[in-house]
Image: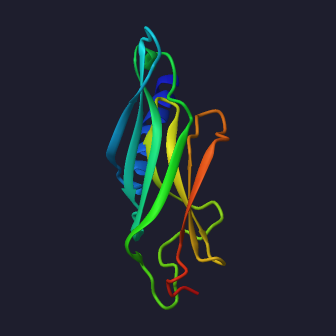
Amino acid sequence: MRKILLGSFVAACVAAGFALTAAVANAEQVGSIELDSGFMSLSSYSLNVQAFDDPKVKGVTCHVSDVAIGGVGAMFSDDPSNASIACRQTGQIVINGVTEDRPWGNLELDESGEDVFGSSKGWFKSLKVTRIVDQARKVLIYVVYTPKWGEDSKKNVVSTISLFAQKLK
């Protein structure tokens, strides 16, 4: 019975991982900077910069940077929970699904926002970017954070895109 439950749990986790991957944008690595690991260190560190386009807002690109551990140290520790984000308008902004009745189109308007990017940082940690819509100020807010299974991440960084010039209600 335990084997069946464990197998079901693992299958559910794998399915959830695939669902999360399908729901968020794909990133392109645009830079990687090797960091000094110190004298005789068995670990290597790199600062990686990835770019992704918002899957529901054409014309918005975000760049996320985070540190990755390599070498022997990668076997014994998680990547640090430090990440940064900068989002910019890179073309004409077009929100998917906009109609006269739905000026915000298919964007999630709930206060908890919508995950637009995610990547794994190890067995129990991930990096996520969530989009929140501030309708009153006509602003898209992008928050990057690194949740770890079993604990809450307190570190986060915010970037915003003003939609002031857009015709939104």
Query: What colour scheme does the image use?
Result: rainbow
Q: Is residue 91 above or below residue 102?
A: above
**The C terminus - image quarter:** bottom right
Residue 131 location in percent, x, y?
A: 54, 61
Could one spot residue 12 in this view of the protein? no
Q: Position of residue 1 (x, y in %)?
A: 51, 25
Closer-to-camera residue (98/91): 91
**As rendered, which of 143 and 152 lies closer to the eye?**
143
Horizontal arrangement in the rendering, residue 140 relative to residue 150 (left or right) = left
149 horizontally vs 60: left or right: right
Identify which residue is drawn at 66% across, 78% down.
136
In the rendered image, is residue 46 in sight?
yes
Q: Residue at x 44, y 20 (%)?
A: 74
Residue at x 51%, y 84% (from the top left corner): 102
**Horizontal placement of 30 versus 147: left or right?**
left
Total marks placed: 0
Residue 4 location (% of width, % of height): 47, 29
Left or right? Give the position of 155 relative to 90: right
Q: Residue furthest top?
A: 40
Q: Position of residue 149 (x, y in %)?
A: 59, 34
91 in relation to 159, above or below:
below
What residue appears at the point 39 percent right and 64 percent down from the top-left corner? 55
